[in-house]
Image: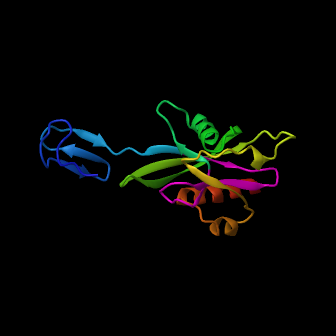
Amino acid sequence: MQFIYCPTCGARDSVTYKDNRHWVCSACGFNLYNNVAASVATILQDNRQRVLFVVREKEPRKGFLALPGGFVDPDERAEDAAVRECREEIGVSPEKVEFIASYPNTYEYGHVVYKTCDMFFTGTLAEDAEKTFAEKLIPQREEVAGFALEAIRTPEDIEKLPIAFPSAVQALHRWLELKKH
């Protein structure tokens, strides 16, 4: 991002990006920090030990697989965001949401590259006798093109999948490690 005019004092060509962290106006001292955006994603398994992925409906990485998730809202706990994002994207709220790892990532949207801190959780879904896991899912049409259930038993299973974001690949590897213990 580049500023032609300072958003505070209006000085032209006075704002510079410093230390890969913040913008500073030499005319008035305005500081704008480039803080990371917090995001969440949840690893959910069905009763056949397959992991649920959404197929992305829009850029970035349209058509690629992603874990159900999204950005944390202001004043929202990460755990609550994980549940909310699942409810919004797949129509189901997970139970027993537990943190497993966080990884830095980048997310390009609208010609802006956002730095993110992606927090990953596991969750369980209440099974009922009348509907299977896949029958419960309702896609958020503007975000989700479809679903994929993939068996992940080895690191190679993860690497062969067209997963949208490197942080999710890292989280799935961590999840696989934790399952061994």
Which colouring convention does the figure follow? rainbow
Check the image and report above or below for 168 versus 24.
below
Q: Which residue is at a point 48% across and 43% down the rendered structure image?
A: 38
Q: Nearer the viewer, residue 179 or 85?
A: 85
Q: Is residue 88 above or below residue 181?
A: above
The picture quadrant where one finds residue 88 is top right
Residue at (42% x, 51% y) in the render: 115
Q: Residue at x 52, y 59 (%)?
A: 62
| 41 inside magenta stretch | yes
Q: Position of residue 89 (x, y in %)?
A: 61, 44
Q: What is the span of residues highlighted in magenta in the rendered image?
A: 40-67
Looking at the rendered image, the quarter that the C terminus falls into is bottom right
Task: Look at the image and say whether residue 117 sits in the magenta stretch.
Answer: no
**Left-right relation of 126 to 86:** right
Is residue 149 shown left or right of residue 29? right
Residue 43 picture location, percent across and down:
67, 50
Q: How many marks?
A: 0
**Left/right of residue 31 with respect to residue 109 in the rendered view:** left
Q: Residue at x 82, y 43 (%)?
A: 131
Compare residues 171 and 151 and report the one nearer the observer. 151
Q: Residue furthest right?
A: 129
Residue 138: image quadrant is top right
Where is residue 153 drawn, in percent x and y? 75, 63
In x, y percent, where is residue 70?
54, 45
